[in-house]
Amino acid sequence: MKKILILLFVLVLALMIATPVFAQGTEPPATPPPIPTEFTAALTGLLAFVVTQGLKSLSAFLAKYPWLAWIDISGWGSVIVAFLVTGLLFYINLGLSFVPTAYTSLVPLIFQFLIGLFTAYGSHLTMKSIAVNR
C-alpha cells in the first residue's frame, strides 16, 4: 500500500511540475518581465562607479602628456565626475525611450561597446589599486 501511495504522490508531483511547461506552448511571452526598480538602481550605481574609475584611469593616462595635464580626476574631482556620470546614465535611460523601433537593435550594441571600454579601464584601475605590490 505504501508503494502505491508513494508512486501516486510522485506521479501527482511530476504532473504539477510539468503542467506549466506544457501549458505555455511554444510561443515566447509577448513582453519580457519587468526588471525591478531596486535592481536597476543598484546596477546604475555599480555602473557609475566602474565608469568613474575608468575615467580616472583614462585621466591618469592622459596626464603623461603635457598638453593634457590639466585633466585631473582625483579627490573631489572623482566625486563630481561620479555625480555627472550617474546623471548622464539617468538621462541616457530617459532618452532611450525616444529611439525609433528601426534602430532598437543597434542602440544596445553601441552602449555595450562604450560601457565595455570604460569598465575595462575602471576594472583595471580598481584591480591595480587592490593588488599587493611584491
Image: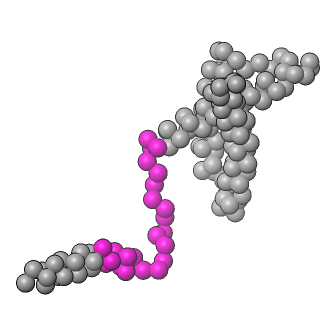
Residue pictured at 69% horizontal, 48% vertical: 111
Q: Is residue 8 left or right of residue 94?
A: left
Residue situated in front as seen by the camera: 102 or 64: 64
Residue situated in front as seen by the camera: 59 or 84: 59
Query: Residue 3 location, x and y as percent?
Result: 14, 82
Residue pictured at 60% horizontal, 38% vertical: 47
- Asked whether residue 79 is drawn in magenta, I would say no
Q: Quadrant of residue 127?
A: top right
Q: Quadrant of the N terminus?
A: bottom left
Q: Quadrant of residue 75?
A: top right
Query: Residue 48 location, x and y as percent?
Result: 61, 34
Instruction: Evaluate whether residue 122 shows in this view.
Output: no
Give, as a single range, the part of the protein colored magenta. Answer: 17-39
Query: Residue 113 location, x and y as percent?
Result: 73, 48
Residue situated in front as seen by the camera: 30 or 79: 79
Give above or below for 7 relative to 30.
Answer: below
Residue pictured at 84% horizontal, 26% vertical: 62
Q: Quadrant of the C terminus?
A: top right
Residue pictured at 35% horizontal, 79% vertical: 23
Q: Residue furthest front?
A: 134
Q: Is residue 6 left or right of residue 104?
A: left
Q: Quadrant of residue 16?
A: bottom left
Instruction: Evaluate whether residue 89 shows in this view.
Output: yes
Q: Is residue 57 left or right of residue 21?
A: right
